[in-house]
Amino acid sequence: TSALAANARRNHGEALELTEQDLPIKLVGGISVVCLIGIAGLLAWFAQTAPALAGSTPLLVIGGLVYVVLIGFAVAAICGYMAGLIGSSNSPVSGVGILAVVIASVLMLGVMAVAGVPADPSIIAFALIVTAVVFAVAVIANDNLQDLKTGQLVEATPWRQQTALIVGVGAGALVIPLILNLLNQAFGFEGGPPAIVEGAKTLAAPQATLISALARGVIGGDLRWDLIGLGAVIGVVIIILDAVLEKATGKKIKLPPLAVGIGFYLPAAVTTMLVIGAVCGWIYDKAVSSTRYADVARRMGVLLASGLIVGESLFGVFTAGVIVATRDDAPFAMLPEGSTWPAMPAGIVGFAVAVIGLYAWTRSRASKV
C-alpha cells in the first residue's frame, strides 16, 4: 500500500523524501508475475510426474496458484506485521503454516472429489509443495519487514533496501538447496533416505514432521480432530493464564503460549539448550544490572548470543561438508567411539568454560565503552 500511495503522489508531481521512495509498483507487479510463472511451472512439473495427478494438471495448477496468491497475501500480512512489530523470531510462522497445510489438504480433498482422483501419496506431496510455497512467502515477509523497519529507524532509502532484499531472495534460492542436499547426504533427515555415511546421526525435523502428519491425516481421513480441538482448548486456557499472571504480578511472571506450544512438540534435545541459554542470559543480566554500563553489556550479550547461533549453524554446514568429503561420520573425534565417560564430562566442562569466558570477555569490553 505504501508503494501505491508513493506512486500516486509521484504521478501528481510531488517530490518524495528519500525515506518514502519505494520500488515502482509496476516493477513489483512484474516480479510477482515472474514468480507466479515459476510456481506454476513447479506445480505443473510435479503433477505431470505423478501418474495419479497428470490428468488433473490444469485444475491443480490453477487452484494452487489461486491458493498461493490468496493465502500467501494473508500470511505475508500477518507474519510481516508481527515481524515488524516484535521481531521475526516471534512471528507465528509455525502456527500459520499449520493452518495453511490443513486448508491446502482440505482443498485437495475437494479436487479429488471433483476430478475423480484416487487416493495416492502424490496428493499429499502436492499439498505439501503448495504449503512450502506459502511458508516461503511467510519467512520472506518476516525477513523483509524486519529489515525495512530497521531501515526506517535509521532513515534508509526503501527502494535500495528492497533491491538488496530481492537479490538476497535469489541468492538464497540458489544456495539453500545445495546446503540442504549436503546436510541430507551427511546426516539424513528423519523419515527420509539414509545418509551416505553409515553411523551418522539423523537430523530431527519436528516442524516438517508435524506438517506432513497433518497433511496425511486430513487427506487420509484419519486425522484426530478431537486432539486438534483439545489443543485449541489448551491454547485458550494458556492464553488466559498468561493474561492473569501478567496482570497479577505486574508483568513479572508470564506463561508465553508460543513457548508452551513449542515445548509440546519440539524434542528435549532442542528445548534443553534453549532453557540453559535462557538461564545463562538471566544470570548475566543480573550480574551487570547494577553497573554503569548495564545497557551496553546487555546489548553486547545479545550480539554474542546471536554470533554463537549463527556460528553454530555455519560450523554445522562445514562439518557436513567434511563428513561427505571424508566419508567419516565423526571427522573431528579425539577419542575412540564409545568413550562416553571421559568425553561427556570434558564436553560439559568445556562448554561451561567457554560460556563463562565469553561472558566475562563481553562484560570487560562493555566496561570500556
Image: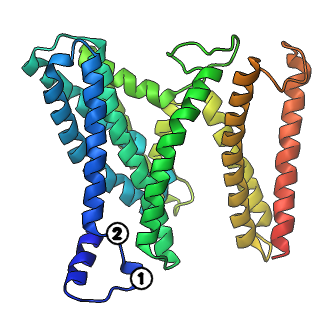
Percent from the top left, x then y, of residue 169? 45, 50
Q: Residue furthest left?
A: 114
Q: Quadrant of residue 39?
A: top left
The image's mark for residue 23 is 2
Query: Residue 8 shows which numbered tag?
Result: none
Instruction: Tell me if residue 5 can be seen.
Output: yes
- Please, which residue is most extreme toward the bottom here? 14
For the residues labelled 2 and 1, the Cα–Cα distance comes to 12 Å
Question: Are there few (<14), some (14-19), or many (20+) residues within 10 Å of tag 2?
Answer: some
- Residue 280 vs 112, above or below: the answer is below
Q: In the image, residue 111 lies at what x, y percent?
A: 14, 24
Q: Is residue 146 above or below residue 224?
A: below
Q: Is residue 81 left or right of residue 25?
A: right
Residue 315 higher or lower than 32, as above or below: above
Q: Amino acid at mark 1?
A: Leu
Residue at the image point whose x is 67% and y is 46% from the top = 309
Q: Which residue is tagged 1?
A: 18
Q: Earlier in the sequence, mark 2 or mark 1?
A: 1
Residue at 80% across, 70% down: 366
Determine the image quadrant of residue 344.
Answer: top right
Q: Residue at x 32, y 34 (%)?
A: 131
Residue ID at (88%, 44%): 353
In the image, residue 47 lies at what x, y percent? 25, 22
Local packing at callout 1 (Cα closer than 10 Å; few below 14, some 14-19, many 20+) is: few
Left or right position of 196 against 92: right
Check disc 1 and report its element: helix, strand or loop.
helix
Say if mark 2 contacts mark 1, CB within 8 Å.
Answer: no
Please indicate, yes or no, whether residue 225 appears anywhere in the rendered image. no
Question: Residue 319, image x and y in percent?
Answer: 73, 31
Element type at mark 2: loop
